[in-house]
Amino acid sequence: MPERLAAVATALAAAIVVIAIAILPFLTPAWVSFEQGRTGAAALTGYTPAQLSAATSSILHDLVIGPPDFAVTVDGAPVLEERERAHMRDVRGVFAGFGLVAIVSAVGLAALIAGARRMGHPERAWAAIAAGMRGLIVAVVVAGIVAAVAFDQAFELFHRLFFPSGTYLFDPRTDHLVQLFPFDFWSETTIVLGALIVVIAAVVAVIAGRRARSGEQATAAIAATTADGRATNASGHAGRPEAVAPDPAGSAPAR
């Protein structure tokens, strides 16, 4: 049972770490600017490209680094109203919570791998990681199918799970938050994020699977060598003639 629990913990921690790594590129100005260009954020907000870039960079800075003020202005006017800023502070809280979980998972994963090595079975940790990656791929594919047929409902469910009811509803005609990050921005980002998670998980699964098999083969070879040595020792001991005690009577000269 402890080994099974360790395997489950290893698989889960590896999956969380991969998800966290996959999210990082989408928090960069390069990706956000690219997607804003694709989804027409400048036209929706009425900002110039320079104003759009400055506003978005400030929001990303407050989201990732902080402090989470989200008080950026354009020509002296606030970009986000207080209700929008409050929602972004909630988003910052969700990101911070997941970041903490990811850090704990990374530390735990390293400890579990080190523990498996100390126990003399590192291949078990690698096998658990490979299993976790396969499970993650299946989960992402299933989530992708659900999102493909009901993205609006999935998006709504996600927000209900992590944010207070009603705090995430905005009018795309007047609210800058959903103009800066329109619906298509999120749908396309979600698709690319899912694809990236699958790619990273597949690569990790292949590497971890090879390490697990290599470790199993090494363990089997050591066990076979040990068994052969024991068999050789046993047969050598059985084949030695037993010593014959000298006959005291035969040692005396015949008369």
Image: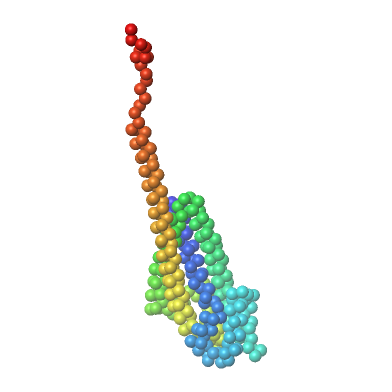
Query: At 38% across and 37% down in the image, what residue appears?
Result: 233
Which quadrant of the rendered structure holds the C terminus?
top left
Q: Quarter-wise, where is residue 104 in the image? A: bottom right
Query: Is 132 placed above or below 30 here?
Result: above
Nearer to the camera, 152 or 133:
133
42 in relation to 145, above or below: below
Q: Count every numbered label the image shows and give the total.
A: 0
Q: Residue at horizontal 49%, vertical 62%?
A: 13
Residue 228: x and y in percent read: 36, 43
Q: Which residue is at the far top?
A: 255
Q: Residue at x 55, y 64 (%)?
A: 103
102 versus 187 height, above or below: above
Residue 114 image position (x, y, % from top left): 51, 55
Instruction: Report whether residue 165 is seen.
Output: no
Q: How is the image coloured?
A: rainbow
Q: Position of residue 239 (x, y in %)?
A: 33, 33
Q: Is residue 232 left or right of residue 32?
A: left
Q: Nearer the viewer, residue 65 or 231?
A: 231
